[in-house]
Image (spheres, grey):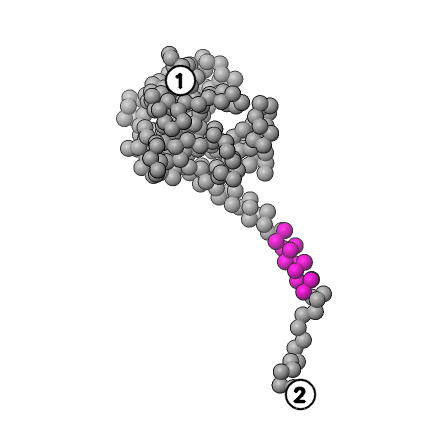
C-alpha cells in the first residue's frame, strides 16, 4: 500500500451539500431569534436610560421648588436651532437642551443616546438627532420631550416651560391636546419618549411611516418617574 494512501475516504459532494443545507436551516431558525434578543436588549437599555433621566428630573425638581426650567433660549440657540417640521411633527420635540439643564444631576452621557436609534434605521432624518453643543465631543440626544416642543410666548398650555408639576398637569388637561389625552395625574403625563413616526401620518415620507426606535411600540418616561414600553398599532412590528 502506498504510504500516502488513506483508509478514510473524504466527503462526497452529496454529503457536503447535505451539511451545507443543514447549516443553512439552522441559521434560518436561529438568526431571527438572535435578532429579537438584540432588539429586546436594546429596548431594555433604552428603558434604563429613561429611568435614569427620571431620577435626574426628580432631583432637579426637588432642588427648584418643583418647577421645570424655562430654557427656550437653549432650545433656540443649540446647533440647528428651533426647527419645527412641516411633515410631522409640526413642532420640535428634540431635547438637546435637557442634558445641559441636568448636567449636575446626570453626569453619565450615555443616558441620552438610545442604542436602538441608529443612523441605519433613520437615515438623513433630522427630527431624530440633536447635539447639545457645537463642540466636537458634544452629546447626541435622540429622545423627544413633547411638552417642551414649542417657543410660544406666553408658554402654551400644553408646554411645561417654567411650570410647576401641579400646574403642568392642570394646564395640559385644560389644553385639550388630542395627542396628549386628558391626564388625571402625573402618571398619565408623558415626559420623555424615544423617537417614532406613526404610520397613520400621511404627510411623512413613505420610508418613515410606522418606523420607530423599537419595533411595535415605544419606551416612555412619565411625569411621576415610572417608565415602560407601550405597544402602538401605528408602528411596524419589525
User: Quarter of the image containing the C terminus?
Assistant: top right
Q: Report the predominant secondary structure element of the magenta stretch.
A: helix
187 sits to left or right of 2: left
Give the residue drawn at x 40%, y 14%.
Answer: 152
What is the residue that sits farthest to the right in this orientation?
14
Q: Which mark is residue 151?
A: 1
What is the residue that sits farthest to the bottom in this orientation?
1
- As measured in the structure, the alpha-carbon distance from the residue carrying label 2 to the one carrying label 1 is 91 Å
- Residue 43: x percent and y percent? 48, 39
Give the residue drawn at x 70%, y 66%.
Answer: 13
Q: Residues within 10 Å of mark 1 (few under 14, many from 20)?
A: some
Evaluate if marks 2 and 1 touch, with contact meaning CB atoms under 8 Å apart: no
User: Quarter of the image containing the N terminus?
Assistant: bottom right
Q: Which mark is residue 177?
A: none
Give the residue drawn at x 38%, y 12%.
Answer: 153
Q: Is residue 230 in view?
A: no
Judged from the image, the secondary structure of the residue bearing numbered disc 1 is loop
Reading the image, the residue beneath label 2 is 1
Residue closest to the eye, 71 or 176: 71
- Residue 236: x percent and y percent? 59, 34
**Snapshot quadrant of residue 11:** bottom right
Magenta segment includes 40: no
Instruction: Magenta stretch: give its range.
Output: 16-28
Judged from the image, the secondary structure of the residue bearing numbered disc 2 is loop
Give the residue drawn at x 59%, y 36%.
Answer: 237
95 sits to left or right of 213: left
Amino acid at each position: 500500500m502506498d504510504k500516502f494512501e488513506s483508509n478514510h475516504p473524504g466527503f462526497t459532494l452529496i454529503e457536503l451539500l447535505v451539511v451545507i443545507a443543514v447549516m443553512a436551516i439552522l441559521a434560518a431558525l436561529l438568526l431571527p431569534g438572535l435578532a429579537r434578543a438584540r432588539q429586546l436588549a436594546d429596548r431594555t437599555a433604552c428603558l434604563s436610560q429613561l429611568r435614569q433621566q427620571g431620577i435626574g428630573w426628580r432631583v432637579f425638581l426637588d432642588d427648584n421648588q418643583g418647577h421645570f426650567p424655562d430654557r427656550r433660549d437653549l432650545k433656540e440657540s443649540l446647533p440647528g436651532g428651533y426647527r419645527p417640521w412641516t411633515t410631522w411633527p409640526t413642532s420640535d420635540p428634540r431635547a438637546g437642551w435637557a442634558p445641559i439643564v441636568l448636567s449636575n444631576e446626570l453626569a453619565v452621557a450615555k443616558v441620552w443616546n438610545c442604542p436602538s436609534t441608529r443612523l441605519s434605521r433613520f437615515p438623513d432624518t433630522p427630527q431624530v438627532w440633536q447635539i447639545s453643543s457645537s463642540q466636537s465631543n458634544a452629546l447626541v440626544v435622540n429622545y423627544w420631550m413633547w411638552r417642551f416642543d414649542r417657543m410660544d410666548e406666553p408658554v402654551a398650555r400644553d408646554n411645561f416651560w417654567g411650570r410647576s408639576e401641579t400646574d403642568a398637569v392642570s394646564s395640559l388637561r385644560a389644553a385639550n391636546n388630542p395627542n396628549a389625552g386628558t391626564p388625571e395625574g402625573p402618571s398619565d403625563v408623558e415626559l420623555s419618549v424615544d423617537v417614532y413616526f406613526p404610520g397613520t401620518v400621511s404627510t411623512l415620507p413613505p420610508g418613515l411611516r410606522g418606523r420607530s426606535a423599537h419595533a411595535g411600540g415605544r419606551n416612555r418616561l412619565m411625569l411621576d418617574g415610572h417608565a415602560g414600553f407601550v405597544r402602538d398599532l401605528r408602528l411596524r412590528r419589525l
